[in-house]
Image (spheres, helix red, strand yellow):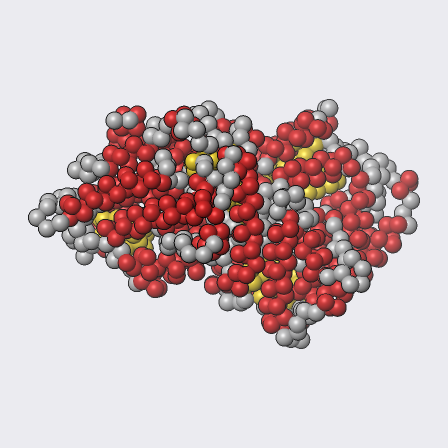
Amino acid sequence: MSAISNSPGYNRLVFDTELKSFEGVLALLDTDISALNQTGKKLIAKSPLSPPEPIYAAGGLAYDAYTRETIVQSVMQENFNLANAGVDAGLSPEFNPWNLIMVGSLAGGGSESGLAGAAIACGCWDDQYKKSWQVLSDCLDAPVYFWEIPRYDADSEKWALRLIKAELEQLFKWLEFQTGRKVTQQSLAEAIRQGNMIRRDLQVFDELLQSDSRLLGGLEYYILQLVSSDYLPNPNELHGIYSRLIDEIRHKSQPGQAVSAAGSAKALRIYLMGDETQQFQLFNTIESCGGRVVGADFRLSLYYEFIDKKGSPLDSLARWIWKMPCNMPTGQRIRETIPFITRQKPDAVIINSAAGSRNLPGSERMVRDIIKEQMGIPVLSIETSLPQQDTEKTEYLVRAFIEMNSY
Amino acid sequence: MNNGNNSILLAGLPERIERDSARITLARNARSKVVGYFCPHVPEELIMAADMIPVRLAQGGDIDAVTAGEDYLKADSCPYARSCLGFRKTENPIYTGVDAVCVAYTCDSMRKNQEYWADYLGIPSFPLGITQTHDRLRSKTQSLEYYKNELNLLAGRLGTLSGQPVTNSKLKRAIELTNRIRDKLWRLFEYPADKQTPIEWRDVFRIAQAGFTMDRQEYLDELTLLDDRLGKIDKQSLTPDSRPRLMICGSIIAQGDDKVLDIVGAAGGNIVADSVCTGSMFSRKRVTLFGLAGSPMDALAERYLYNIPCPFMTDLPKRLSRIVKIARDYNIDGIIYYSLKYCDTWRAEFKAVRDIAQKQLSIPTLLIEAEYSPADIGTIKTKVEAFIEMMEGR
């Protein structure tokens, strides 16, 4: 297999080896940028929670540097010194480790960027991310373009949609300049169609987790979510990889087929919320303590619903962006998310904060209160940082939480 | 040096600041509503035009308020943001005296503030959308249109709260009064550009902060009086100040957050200019109404969106050019870059400011990261003293 499978981080993790098709997903973690560049398509960096459709509509390839650089460099290769390189580039040491590693990796030579540019959405979700790209714009030999997504307020809808559309139209022009290909109604409609295929796949993974049996491990599910944000290597191939995995899981779940022994039917069903964690072993810990991950909202904003295929693609995309849950004030975001959580039939929720992150942790109390009040299930808050940092405390908390709520 | 004039010029000012909380209580008793705001992207003119009293909630430096704020925001949020919630819990009369707050969607921490005020602190909390991509060439048209509509929405909400709709004529009157305040304040901030100044920046800064809670007409009268007195002083008779001339820029310096200013003063530094949102920024740009038919809302949008951009906005070149211009205008020897701990937006721009100050002005920049607790006083003192000594030796 790939360099990833020989990495120290990989070897610390326990994967479901019976799930053969998952190897295709793991290979996605090892995306070779130079190979992507050889496709002749321009590689454009994007924010984790912005839709990749505009980039594909312009004939480019989207690249979620935040997720990919961090998984490869920090989680798998354990190059934690890149966080210092992020500080040297200009970030505060108090930034969350995702931004530190991304900036350290791209600015500090940890990774050949090979980027043709970066189209960074400025939404309401993370100041640090915006500042990281501001710092990177000085270090990279590639243009960085910021575009606006105003925060959701139902009373502002009329003019906010006009703003998003104007921003998208200008973004298309910038992308055209980078890729040499014009965004047309047809190319945008096609990108939306392909994106909706990925959305459907991600919805299916959630449906599989609704089962009483453990059809898909927490770690595998988490990685599936993480690699979805840029559709690499391209939407069709990613859909193919997801489809093969879905077929294998469905086949295994048919009567008469042996379902993985790991995780009993009585496992405490846990829904994860908040920031993504670099401590991938958290998912192994949950399962080894008698829990089972039944869903997560980390990337829910990317597939919360399909982008409408009817009417003008620009209008549909703008409207879909406007209502992304991550774009809403916390109270509304959680209330909109609760139906998705409820479908996964969780017994408990764990909220993760990435150390140094200010956005989601800032609303943690509100999330906790709303979940407890509206769903009546226990909530545990944890904080995680770099992969090997303070893991004992998290393990202890998770174990105690699962034990306490398993009766 | 200002030759001891300040004690006379500023006579009674601290007492008048103290009086503000009582004024707010009186106003409430008289059934006038008081509306608080945090970031200077909320036009106080709108609150005035809705016949309510605007107060800027920009107090800080109080460790109890910071701790109280941790009931909502985590300890690794900036201390100002925590205080904004904490002061309500510790029953600071200005924070408990407000009937509503307006919160601009600026940085992450302020957006959370809006949510907690709305859902936990029991009074209306009006959000104000504001764009982050601050690019005059590319996005100005749609950004202005969006922001103007947000201002209209806010005006409607404020009018509903007070029962007094915001009209163009009331808005124009409020703009006129506020512009006069800006003009007077700007004149005060210009004095320290001269080495022979009858008033120091530190005092002008205190006066600017006092204005956050003072009655607007009363404040204008005070500024006018002070301006008249200062105008009568013969500057040539003053001794030129030979201390190193410093500029302070960075995170908000809230009312009561005097730690770093005190340390710089005690170490022999002379702050003469600033680029902070509680300092000269408010008075820098007037709201320009174009003719009698000019739309006041257009004018407000233009002024409040395109004053000096706070670093939650993307226009770093504009911020840098502003800092360079101030440094040149005030003949600065060094920059104190004040970053509140966990203030991500300012902290991430330190390197850019340091580099441009070195490259274009050949002056040094000192990064000070501070909390509101006294625990870091020793460290800050050592850094500041070494910095000022270095400048004295240049």
Quadrant location, the C terminus of chain B: top right
At x 69% / y 37%, what residue is drawn?
Answer: B321
Left or right: residue A348 versus residue B287 is left
Q: Kindly identify the residue that appears in the image at 48 percent across and 30 percent down.
A: A115
Q: Along the line of sight, which residue is nearer the eye, B221 or B144?
A: B144
Q: How many marks?
A: 0
The percent coordinates of residue A379 (x first, y second) are 32, 55
Asked if residue A89 can be seen in this view, the reply is no
Between A200 and A359, the one lying in front of the other is: A200
Please, is residue B178 above or below residue B160 in the view? Answer: above
- Where in the figure is residue A342, as x and y percent of width and height? 29, 59
Asked if residue A13 lies left or right of residue B239, the reply is left
Q: Quadrant of residue A26?
A: top left
Q: Position of residue B192 (x, y in %)?
A: 79, 42
Residue B102 shows in the view? yes
Q: Quadrant of residue A331?
A: bottom left
Q: State the residue at coordinates (41%, 45%).
A: A190
Residue positioned most to the left: A256
| Residue B212 pos. (x, y %) | 68, 57
Q: Left of A4 or right of it: where is B171?
A: right
Out of A184 and A43, give the one closest to the viewer.
A184
Residue at the image position 64 percent from the left and 58 percent from the top: B148
| Residue, far front | A186
Quadrant containing the N terminus of chain B in the rendered view? top right
Q: Is residue A249 above or below residue A210?
A: above
